[in-house]
Image (tube, rainbow, N blue to C red):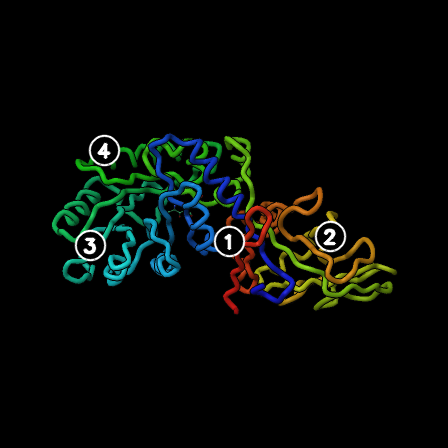
Amino acid sequence: MDYYRDTWAEINLDAIKWNVAKTIQHLADSMTMFAVVKANAYGHGDVQVAKAALNAGAKGLAVAFLDEALSLRKAGIKAPILVLGASRPDTAGIAAKYNISLTVHEKEWLTHIHMEEGQMLRIHIKCDTGMGRIGVKTIGELQSVIDELNQSESYVFEGIFTHFATADEVHTAYFEKQLQTFQELVSSIREKPRYIHCANSAATLRFQGAGVNTVRFGISMYGLTPSLEIQPLLPFELKPAFSLRTKIIQVKQMHAGEKVSYGATYEASEGEWIGTLPIGYADGWIRKLSGQEVLVDGKRAPIVGRICMDQCMIRLPREYSCGTEVTLIGRQGDDEIIMDEVARKLETINYEVPCVITARVPRVYKENGQVVHVSNPLL
Ligand SMILES: Cc1ncc(COP(=O)(O)O)c(C=O)c1O
C-alpha cells in the first residue's frame, strides 16, 4: 500500500479501456485515435491512462506541453506523442531526441528552431479555423509554413489539425463553418501528411471524427460527456472512470446551538450527528462545495459549515462508526454522485473537476475490481 491517508481517487482502468474500445468500434476502420492525456490525463494519471488507452486500441497520445510528453517517455511509453500546444523553439532538439511530435502554429516559430546536425523533428501544423487561439488562418500562411518545412531535411511533415470551439453544442452552424475552413486548408496541400485531425470527443462521437483520418479523444475516454446538452445525442452510454472516496475519522453528537467549522456559520440542532472527513480545499475539494452532498451507506449527507484546508464536516442521518467509507464522486450503493453534479455546484464544467483534485490525493488504479497500481507523488 503506497498511501496512508484515508482519502483517495479510484481510477477504473476497465472503464477507460471500454470507452476507448467502444469508440473505436463506432469509427471507420481507417480512423486512428490519439488519446488526450494532457494535464495528468485530466487528473486521472497520465501513465496509467496512456497505457490503458493504448492497450484498448489508441495508436498515439496527445499532451499540451513538452514536459508532459517527456514524462511519458521517461515512464517507458514508446507510442507516438504529439504536443498540442506551442513549445519553445529552443526545445525542438529535445523533442527530436525523444521522438516527440511538435506543433507549428506560425512560420516565424520555425525560423527560431535549434536542433543538432542530423536530428529529425516530426511536425504537425495547427490551423486556427475559429478558436482564435493558436494556428495559421489562411492558405497563404499554411503554404508558407509548408515551404519552410520543405527547405530542410530535418523535418517530417507528419500532421495537420484544427480544434473546434462548439462541437459540444447542439447547434452545428459554427462547427460546420470551422470544418469547411479546415477542409479548404487541407485541400490546398499537394502532399498530404499522415495524420489529419480535427475531432475532439464531441466531434468523434457525434460526427465519427468529421471525415478525416485521426481523432483526438479526451473527455469521453474518461467516461464524461463533452457537455450536458449533447449527452442525449451520444451514440452510447459512457462509463465514468473517476471516483473520489474518503473515510469518516470522527463522529460526534451535537447539542442544539453548537457550531461547526471556521466562522461558526453552521449551527447544529439537538442530537444531530456530525462526521469529520479528512479532505479539504488543499485536495481540490474547495470551499464552494460547502452544502454539496456525499454518499454514506448509499445515502446522501450534506457537507455543513466551511470546508477547511484538510478536513470538512458532514451531517449524518444517524450515528456511524469511524472508518465508514464516504463517496464524494462516484457510485455507492444505489446512488451516484456524477462529475456533472459536482461541476454544477462549482459552476463549471466536468473537465475541470478531476483536473483540480490535487496531487496530495493518491490515485488508486483498479482493473477487474482489483487494485493494480497506486500513484502517490508524496512517497
Ligand atoms: C487541441 C485539443 N485537442 C483535443 C482536445 C480533447 O478534447 P476533449 O477532451 O473534448 O475530447 C483538447 C482538449 O481541450 C484540445 O485542447
**In what quadrant of the picture does the N terminus appear?**
bottom right
What residue sits right under mark 4 in the picture?
187
Which badge, 1 or 2, is on the more N-terminal residue? 1
SS label for mark 3: loop
Q: Closer to the camera: disc 4 or disc 2?
A: 2
* Mark 1 Cβ and ligand 1 under 8 Å apart: no
Relative side of 55 to 153, left or right: right
What residue sits right under mark 3 in the picture?
120
Which badge, 3 or 2, is on the more N-terminal residue? 3
Relative side of 277 to 177, left or right: right
Q: Quadrant of residue 167?
A: top left
The residue type indicated by label 4 comes to Ser
Whether residues under marks 4 and 2 lie with C-beta atoms below 8 angstroms apart, the answer is: no
Query: Which residue is drawn at the image coordinates 58% and 56% (left, top)?
Result: 9
- Compare residues 109 and 372 and report the one nearer the observer: 372
What residue sits right under mark 2 in the picture?
296
Q: Quadrant of residue 76?
A: bottom left
